[in-house]
Amino acid sequence: MSNNLLNGKRGIIFGALDENSIAWKVALKAHEQGGKFVLTNAPIAMRMGEINKLAEKCGTIVIPADATVTEDLAKLVAESTAHLGGKLDFVLHSIGMSPNVRKGKVYTDLNYEWYQKTLDISALSLHKLLQTCMKQEAMNEWGSVLALSYIAAQRAFPGYGDMADAKATLESIVRSFGYYYGTQKKVRINSISQSPTMTTAGSGIKGFDSFFNFADKISPLGNASAESCADYCIALFSDLTRFVTMQNLFHDGGFSNTGISEAMMNEFMSK
Ligand SMILES: NC(=O)c1ccc[n+]([C@@H]2O[C@H](COP(=O)([O-])OP(=O)(O)OC[C@H]3O[C@@H](n4cnc5c(N)ncnc54)[C@H](O)[C@@H]3O)[C@@H](O)[C@H]2O)c1
């Protein structure tokens, strides 16, 4: 169903790897809502070729960019505004990767080179992207930038490793850059703290299945799906949320405000 919430708006969507990706669902919904956008991902992710199918469905192009490389970002932003025929109204940063988590390195035994990569890919890339957009004056007033986060930014979740530090930094960049971009250009910046979701990035975490089921049992509404996360992104890109900025917004079925659920208690009842 379309309400044309993004009619006349232009954007860039980072992070659609395959049809499970949160960014993939956002792209389909943004298209449905009348938005025009460019898709991008790291050159290495292009090899899978899946993103081209998405581009075809959305009637758009793919411009490869490594989000840690400022030259790539500068080219991407310049080419996107040229292709779309004007400044941007929405940007989705749906990027995350930790070599330590991938290779099973626990938080107390990190490889520090990989740690820096985790921070660069999963957090600093947002700063690099925002700084690039600001320098190129690429965003329209009241534009909306969204990043994806996880509650491990604020609470201890063993298994999430150094990604927790990356998400804490990401949420801080949302606040700090949100201040400057808001005062200078009325651009809003928020992060969505999403439930565990079955995607490539999600299932890279050790014991993800039990993690997923645990969150589902605690949350009064159950885990939020990637599909509903995409709906939330569209609402935040739209003009209906113009004064929301510098926030970390939980999209987690109530998980973050629940101590224990009856469903979970039942698991521990003596039989
Ligand atoms: N899946 C979950 O459980 C969950 C929960 C909360 C938040 N998130 C966050 O949602 C976002 C999207 O992840 P997803 O779950 O859709 O998984 P995903 O694996 O489909 O998406 C992650 C994307 O990051 C891209 N990426 C990695 N390195 C990059 C680089 N150097 N430059 C550009 N892109 C790069 C990947 O190619 C991929 O498309 C991430 O920020 C993730 O941390 C996921």
Image: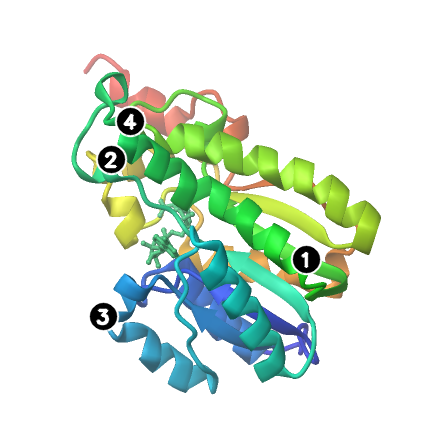
Tell me how far mark 1 sits from mark 3, CA to CA: 31 Å
With 44 as the anchor, is 66 left or right in this view?
right
Earlier sequence position, callout 3 versus callout 4: 3
Query: Please, what is the three-letter code of the amino acid marked with disc 3?
Result: Arg
Hey, which quadrant is residue 173 in on the image? top right
Residue 135 marker: 1
Hey, which quadrant is residue 10 in on the image? bottom right
Q: Nearer the viewer, mark 2 or mark 3?
A: 3
Question: Against 169, is 42 above or below?
Answer: below
Tell me how far mark 3 sits from mark 4, CA to CA: 28 Å
Earlier sequence position, callout 2 versus callout 1: 2
Classed neighbour count for the residue bearing mark 1: other residues with Cα under 10 Å, few (<14), some (14–19), many (≥20): few
Q: Which residue is mark 3?
A: 47
With 96 as the anchor, is 114 left or right in this view?
left
Q: Secondary structure at mark 4?
A: helix
In x, y percent, where is residue 239? 75, 64
Q: Which residue is mark 4?
A: 112
Query: Please, what is the three-letter code of the amino acid marked with disc 1?
Result: Lys
Q: Residue at x 72, y 61 (%)?
A: 143
Question: Against 198, is 259 above or below?
Answer: above
Q: Are marks 2 and 4 in contact (CB under 8 Å)?
A: no
Query: Please, what is the three-letter code of the amino acid marked with disc 4?
Result: Tyr
The quarter in which the C terminus is drawn is: top left
Q: Nearer the viewer, mark 3 or mark 4?
A: 4
Q: Which residue is mark 2?
A: 101
Classed neighbour count for the residue bearing mark 3: other residues with Cα under 10 Å, few (<14), some (14–19), many (≥20): few
Q: Nearer the viewer, mark 2 or mark 1?
A: 1
Tell me how far mark 2 sits from mark 1, CA to CA: 34 Å
Earlier sequence position, callout 1 versus callout 3: 3
